[in-house]
Image (cartoon, helix red, strand yellow):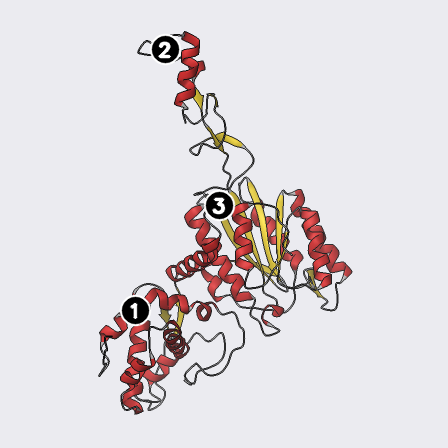
Amino acid sequence: MRFHTYTKHSPELADAVDLQSLLDKLADFLLQSGFAGGSKGTFGWEFDGDPNDRSMDALRQAILDALFESGQFTPEMLEALRGEGGEEGEAKLATLLDALVQRLVEEGYLNLSAPPMMPQGHQTVEGKGSLAHAASRDVQFNLTEKGIDFLGYKTLRGLLGTLGRSSFGSHDTPYLATGIESDGWSKPYEFGDALNLDVNETLKNALARTGSLEVPLDVDYPDLMVRQAEYRSSCATVLMLDCSHSMILYGEDRFTPAKKVALALTHLIRTQFPGDTLQVVLFHDSAEEIPLATLAKAQVGPYHTNTAEGLKLARKLLLAQKKDMRQIVMITDGKPSAMTMADGRIYKNSFGIDASVLATTLREVADCRRSGIVINTFMLARDRTLVEFVKRVSQIARGKAYFTNTMTLGQFILMDFLRRKTRKVS
């Protein structure tokens, strides 16, 4: 067995860390949605326990935890870095963490921003309590588009590990057309068909017509046969994410897994279904569309669930898309408890299922059906009244209902998206 002794920190130690593995371990931290955690890290470093903390101190603590969790940073390495302990050891460790943050920035996964600051009174430039110390504390980090895309790729790879693959850039439908993949019988060539020639059938027709094997063969227009392939359609999808307060209550963060699924779908569509579109709608007291680039920073709140407003906005977005297929993927954990009134005010009722709110929601569901939009609902709860509500939505919209949890949510959504098969999940 080989042994390594680290006597002091060197830049090579930070360079030896697998940056992509580190970023994968940081996924939950980078995408956290407001779930209240502890006030200390794994190894006792104090930091602000606010789950929305985007400070450098929180990032350093998360990196340290991820290094230990991934096995890239052993306790022996930490002991060697700290040496005899004290301020010198802490400074060495801080230097290592800063070097890793710098690598993440240089590779384009993160960017840093800080508000402009001016010295106050006789504030020094360096040292504890100095301008530099305050500026470091106020530096904020954000995921870049490259970082978001990478996390989507890693999530997708994990979810599809046991689900197989899908054909490139296409969705299966029951129809046949001329194309590249031969999935059906050959047919006589018609003007406008892709010339995916079935050579065997074409020569067979020519020989049957002429009865001659002389070369060159006499091939006429009616002899031409082309192979049929499955017709491939484009699809417009709106992912509706419930971000009401219940999505982080009861000891479970349900919103972060939903964001991971959205990132995975985004990567899947961008790389495998380039003709498709995906848009994200958050619904709470009201509803709004958010750019995919800001999804990582999306937080839970306000408190209620205005499902009707979310469906209305999703339908508007889908009708603007000129696609063969349109669908809504709705992820929620609760009953509709709010609606937008004619004068723009928000009516809210969290007690039971309000008849007016329910009627307004089901009217929006019916409007989606009349517009040819399928609604597939993924319910993160199993309350009896919620089950009945989801069943009614599925019946009206001719969609599917899945009653799942945060562990299986991504698998069910991707299976539905890729396979397009009706299945009942109990």
Quarter residue 244 falls in: bottom right
Type of amino acid under label 1: Arg
Image location (x, y in percent) of residue 221: 42, 14
Residue that label 3 marks: 276
Which residue does the image show at 47% across and 64% down from the upper left?
Answer: 296
Type of amino acid under label 2: Asp
- Spatial separation of the CA atoms under disc 3 and disc 1: 34 Å
Residue that label 2 marks: 218
Crowd rating for badge 1 (residues with CA inside 10 Å; few <14, some 14–19, many 20+): some
Whether residue 173 can be seen here: yes
- Horizontal side of 255 relative to 141 (left or right) equals right
Crowd rating for badge 3 (residues with CA inside 10 Å; few <14, some 14–19, many 20+): many
- Spatial separation of the CA atoms under disc 3 and disc 2: 44 Å
Mark 1 or mark 2: whose residue is earlier in sequence: 1
Task: Report the quarter where the C terminus lies.
Answer: bottom right
Residue that label 1 marks: 103
Q: Nearer the viewer, residue 409 or 348?
A: 409
Say which mark, if any, is on residue 409.
Answer: none
Type of amino acid under label 3: Asp
